[in-house]
Image (cartoon, rainbow, N blue to C red):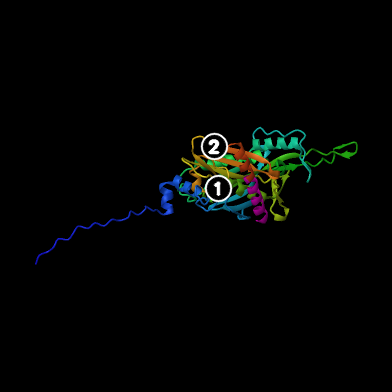
Amino acid sequence: MTLKPTPNTTTTRTPQPLTLPPHIFAKLSPHAYLAAHLDSPNGSLRPSGRTPSQSRPPTIHTNALTHAHGSAVIRCGDTAVVCGVRGEILKVDDIAGWTPREGLEPLRDGTDDGVKRRKKDSEELAQLGLLVPNLELATGCSPAHLPGGPPSPLAQALSQRVLTLLHTSNIIDLEQLRIWHRPPSPADVSMEGQELVLEAEVKAFWVLYMDVWFISLDGNAFDAAWLALLAAVRNTRLPRAWWDGEREGVLCDERLSESQRLRVRDFPVPLSFGVFTMPGGGKGGLGMGEKGKTGDEKWILADMDGFEEALCLEIITVVVGEGDRVVKIEKSGGGAVRGGELRGLVRLARERREVWVGVLEGG
């Protein structure tokens, strides 16, 4: 039998495009992954499904801690924060170099403190250090915070930013933290047949310790920390306190019915934005995306999550108070945002404040 040779045959295969799951793509090339979402022909959408100007919906729960004078838990997306406020007594005898202010008298309920007194009270509040915020990023709140490490620079920077905004916004009235004492008039001292009334004096102050604890951190830490603190302060009730001359100390009434709610002058709400730039072109977002001088495309993202925040080189925080008043604007890194764009950010911050006020009043 003779075997016939078979002709050589080759099979041509069509090359298949390389596909990666989204989470792998985000790990390997995060900038390209985010730009692919923002530069989509169907419109700019972030990986979370939000538009560039859309913030995460907030939730709030007050009176969460039993042994604090005020507390709140807030959540924005996967960022969750707990804040507890507790008041402690500081006697003026324990203040180094304490000298009472001349002509200072206790205010009656409903009396306006006036501009001059409010300014001096604000300076005294900062000088005495009666507001003490402390922020802690709990172990496991994010992959970057492992057990056994020292306090992170982020926690220290956030504490200082919160303290600065507390004094800048002037939301807490020092009069509420003063503990007054009016000495009784001696029975045997009189002037022209009338009893002598001695001047009232400040014997102690309330010091507010505000502990902010991050349970989960997924970007925009400052906004979440401040709003948790502010919600807790608005919910704070301080016991009725008075000076006891015989004991030479301050006594407090533990009954809740005798406590007094801490009044807050304003409810300033921050909204932080990040500027994301990508070499090349694109349609941009927030209605402000455009080519820069270098030919790079930029997008301004409101309320960044952790993934987006790590890719933004410029951060802007706009704080808006009552009456659409701009309390403060902070900016770090870069210089891509100009005046016209900044006005758009202020508008979004005002809208964000309305959302937070509604949530707080409903919570």
Distance Cα–Cα, label 2 vs label 1: 16 Å
Residue 211 x/y as whole percent:
58, 47
Tell me the quarter of the image containing the C terminus: bottom right
Residue nearest the viewer, comparing 80 with 261: 80
Magenta segment main secondary structure: helix
Residue 184 x/y as whole percent:
80, 42
The disc, 2 or 1, on the residue closer to the chain's N-terminal end is: 1
What residue is rendered at 63% in x and 39% in y?
A: 328
- Tell me: 166 left or right of 199: left
**Residue range corresponding to the magenta coloring:** 348-363
Q: Is residue 121 visible?
A: yes
Residue that numbered label 1 is attached to: 52
Q: Amino acid at mark 1?
A: Pro
Residue nearest the viewer, comparing 66 with 294: 294
Task: Say few, some or many: other residues with alpha carbon within 10 Å of mark 1 (under 14 / 14 to 19 / 20 or more).
Answer: many
- Tell me: 236 left or right of 42: right
Residue 196 x/y as whole percent:
84, 38
